[in-house]
Amino acid sequence: MSKGYTNPQVAEEQRRIRYLEQMPGYNIKQELDALNLASWIMSENVQQIDRHLREFIGTGKIVHELPETYSSELSRLLLNFLASVGSMRDVQLRLVHKYWGKDSDFDIRIYRPKVADLFGSGPAKFLIDLRNYVIHRGAPEAHLGSKLIMEQGQPPRHLNSVHYKKSELLAWSKWTGPSKSYLNSLAEEFDLAEPIEHYSNAARDFFGWFWNKFIEEHSSERDQYLTRAAEFWAWYEEKNVVPDWVRQPGGEPPSDWKGKWSMLPLRAPKRAARFKLGTAGFQPFTVDSNGEVAAPESDGWGPFPDYDR
């Protein structure tokens, strides 16, 4: 039985994609994407908590005007944030162990001191331990309050607050030294704004530092992958230009349509962009000490074929 026909351009596209996915730089890109996603999730969780609190704090609402699920939703958002704190740390630590090695020189002399520098303060330690707290005891209870403020010459207003109680948290016996000291320094009723902001700022600084360290370590693999991926997609876009009439109802070509000749001006901007980008697929010939010219060894990438469609 004969094999079915395969469009040569489609086959070439699939071959190039397989090639790219087998490059070392592809894995580096995947790792960076995972790291970036973990950072985005944590940042988005912080913003969601802030938006939720602003629905009450600083408004004219009183507690009884809030939805019944307001406190439950706040607890859910807090749990999401604390989970993302752990995920962010886990992703970074996994990369250290995978690419530098556990207990390697980088791990011991560079990574761990940086962690201690940025996350060794009381607020950061408290937030890390709070994650352990919720694992064992569930979300801490958020207490909502509305106080009526009467000032001479001013209209009455409500001062709203969302706070947690120190005594309730201290009932847990597993707080580490720095976090317990920080907790003891707080008033009986306190909010989580300071530790969340402190940790978020530290996490942002650490993310930027770690991102740069990882890229420095793998810059050549990453650059080669990004260069060849850009070449491929520039070629792909040139070869897969679709005229506007295809997307119109009925998909019928205009009366003056001349096939591939009408496609030339549509492809021209894409081709110009592709040639402006250049290519790393061509390797130079070399001349040895005896004056003999040696052709470059192919690594399987090579120049892109030109198909007419």
Image (cartoon, grey):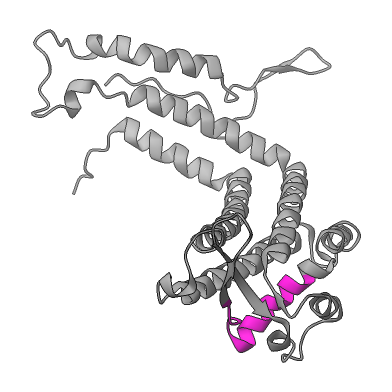
Q: Is residue 304 magenta?
A: no
Q: Position of residue 227 (x, y in %)?
A: 59, 30
**Image quadrant in which the C terminus is located:** top left
Establish if 223 lies above or below 165: above
Q: Is residue 278 left or right of residue 308?
A: right
| Residue drawn at (67%, 68%) of the image | 192
Q: Position of residue 144 (x, y in %)?
A: 56, 75
Q: How many marks?
A: 0
Write down the quadrant of residue 146 in the picture: bottom right
The residue furthest right is: 109
Q: Is residue 78 left or right of residue 3?
A: right
The residue furthest front is: 153
Report the front residue among 45 and 66: 66
Establish if 137 lies above or below 120: below
Q: Is residue 191 left or right of residue 30?
A: right
Q: Position of residue 303 (x, y in %)?
A: 50, 23
Report the front residue among 302 and 58: 58
| Residue drawn at (79%, 18%) of the image | 288
From this viewpoint, is residue 101 visible? Answer: yes
From this viewpoint, is residue 98 visible? Answer: no
Q: Is residue 134 magenta?
A: yes
Establish if 18 lies above or below 304: below
Residues shaded magenta: 125-143
Q: Position of residue 272 (x, y in %)?
A: 46, 12
Which SS does the magenta portion mostly show?
helix
Report the front residue among 114 and 277: 114
